[in-house]
Amino acid sequence: MSTTVAGVSLRGQKLPSWAPIGCAVLAALLTLAIFAVSSVSGHAEFGVLLVSLFIVIQTAASFFVEGRRQAKNRLFTTFVYGAFLAAMVPLVFILETVVSKGIGGISGGFLSHSMFLIDPSGKGGGAYHAIVGTLEQGLIAGLIAAPLGILAAIYLVEYGRRAPFARVISFFVDIMVGVPSIVAGLFVYALWILVLGFQKSGFAGSLALFIIMMPLVIRSTEEMLRLVPAELREASYALGIPKWKTILRIVLPSAIGGIVTGVMLGLARIMGETAPLLLLVGGNSKINFNPFSFGSTPNPQMSLPTYINEQFGIATGNPDAPAFHRAWAAALTLIVIVMLLNGVARLIAHLTRARA
Amino acid sequence: MPDLETATAVATPPDKAPSSITGPAVRPGDRVFRGTAIAAGSLVLLVMAGIAGFLIYKAIPALDKDTTNFFTTQVWQPDAVKPTFGIAALLMHTMITGLLAMTLAVPISIGIALFINFYAHRRLASGLGYIVDLLAAVPSIVYGLFGITILAPHLHGLVDWLSKYFGWTGFLHYRPDNIPNSHSDLTGGIVLAIMILPIISSLSREVFRQVPRDQIEASLALGATRWEMIRTAVLPYGRSGVVSASILGLGRALGETLAVAYILSSTTDLNFHITETGGITFASNIANKYNEASPLGINALIASGLCLFVITLVVNLVAQSIVRRKAGEA
């Protein structure tokens, strides 16, 4: 750039728009040439050599034609594109794997039968009992976490503004978001099963899921309540409407779309949780509609994550075992449920945003 | 009964002036509603205190009976005649896999977030953002299933390659007497990285999206290249948000259970050879042992869970202090 003399050209020289592709081709040719003449071989070596040559060639070309700043810019662009590719490949690969391996196992029978009286190492059976368990445990956790979380958020936004107690709660909500699910599970195990002496049950799992879900609901609801304009509240107060009625009839309805979205995203998150359910719910090959069976006789519930874990254990790494196919089919079912919840949540967010 | 007093005050006939004209009247409904909201908020404190309290309460019997130092012992044998167990190996491998996941995931996540916000075509970007958000919702057990059945077998080549060319670093060295099955810290770290990638990048994307438009445009108008714009306008603004997103990701990685339990081979060795078979973490140890544990074994696992809780607590406190300091500056 410094060599450009004013008056000759106000714009610096630029590499043509096909330069990256040109550099890539050049790097590929060079790599092939090196492979042909030397003893280097292997896929990984090819990739590493190709990428490093590409970076060197492009940076050098850019440096001599466009100058240092553009060369840096191109280097960083390469990094950003590279990072994106490096991440999308495994992530898309995972989805592709689950769909291709799971789709074969999904059938009407799989979705409507349990594993009761089925030889676990043989064919047949299904995940109906696990689907029932996942939905029930998730919904119970949601039914406790959603109202309590929304109320706590109402306290933080509407009542506790800047009060020290609200700050403390807000601080601990952030900490609670980071509590590992297995620690939540151990806590419920210590309290519910060891101290109170109840049996493993779906409800015990719901309690742990509630601990994971509540801070998520509080955070998302808080954000939504803060978006409600203060004018709405003031107009309501000016009409002599009490604060609680203002919150219930004015503030909540105008934020309800976002709040529901947050609750659905929280549900999607907890329905995929495995570790606390392993500790607290146990497994059952029978259909059990009753998550509250924590009395004296153990009557646990299955859930999709624990079902995947169980079937994967039965298969013992043999990719042709029927249990292995059931594990993948259950994984696909679980992903579909979670994605559906996500999709509905986003749809609600989209619709309510469009109206506002 | 203060509630009744206010109730009568509100119910006074309209010929008298309202009891107060300086603020909204406090009515019984308000008291009830406010009380309920405060109770719900206090539940957060109650649960957090409960977690700490009950874990400590149930961990004490185990720590009492432990015949060795809980913090420096490698092995986990709570059911031996002389109960011997400690968290040295758990702590080390939890840290190694967590840090490995961070080193791999953070730069790539930032790359994705920048790509979606500043490099990709607008229409493509919203679709990609949606995909990343969806991936953040994939249950962790699915990542575990994928990691052990698909990824681990494919990593043999990489492990050999790393050991061949980078064996001199020591920690990538693969000693010949080791069984080659990729049940290593490296595989665990890679699976965790894939798992936390969508979480970190989806949070970072939000942060970068809030960078003031005028600062970006001002920097471009002054002739900055895209990299210079990102370095001077985007990164300084988003730094604290990205740091807290990364630490949140680290918290997830440290506490992740089954994905890691499937992959690591549950040996309590202390070594830094991350490409070798081995590794065990707090969470994977709990997942592997809870089923056959004796009452003392359960208490011992709860003691290790308490350690994990304290570690994630510290990690989160660091993240909080970074975010709050930034908020104080602004």
Image (cartoon, coloured by chain):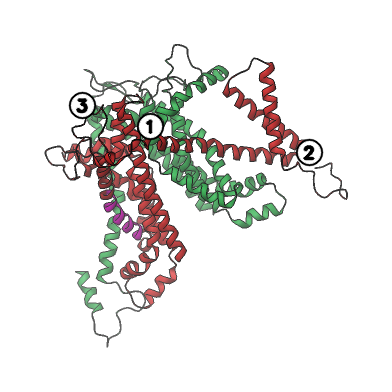
Chain colours: A red, B green
Q: CA distance from mark 3 to mark 2?
A: 72 Å
Q: Residues within 10 Å of mark 3 (few under 14, many from 20)?
A: few
Q: Residue at x 66, y 37 (%)?
A: A75
Up-down relation of residue A78 to residue A142 (above or below) = above
Amino acid type indicated by mark 2:
Val
Q: Quadrant of residue B92?
A: top left
- The label shown at residue B297 is none
Up-down relation of residue A192 to residue A145 (above or below) = above
In the picture as drawn, the residue positioned furthest to the top comes out as B177
Q: Quadrant of residue B261?
A: top left
Tell whether position A142 is magenta. yes
Q: Chain of mark 2?
A: A
Magenta segment range?
A141-155
Given this view, does label 1 or label 2 mark the residue nearer the observer? 1
Given this view, does label 1 or label 3 mark the residue nearer the observer? 1
Q: Quadrant of the C terminus of chain B?
A: bottom right
Q: Residue at x 19, y 69 (%)?
A: B1
SS at mark 3?
loop
Q: Chain of mark 3?
A: B
Q: Is the residue at mark 3 from the same chain as the one at mark 2? A: no
Q: Return the residue at label 1.
A: B145
Viewer can see residue B144? yes
SS at mark 2?
helix
- The label shown at residue A65 is 2
- The label shown at residue B294 is 3
SS at mark 1?
helix
Q: CA distance from mark 1 to mark 2?
A: 50 Å
Amino acid type indicated by mark 3:
Ser
Q: CA distance from mark 1 to mark 3?
A: 28 Å
**First-in-chain label (1 vs 3):** 1
Q: Main secondary structure of the magenta part?
A: helix
Viewer can see residue A167? no
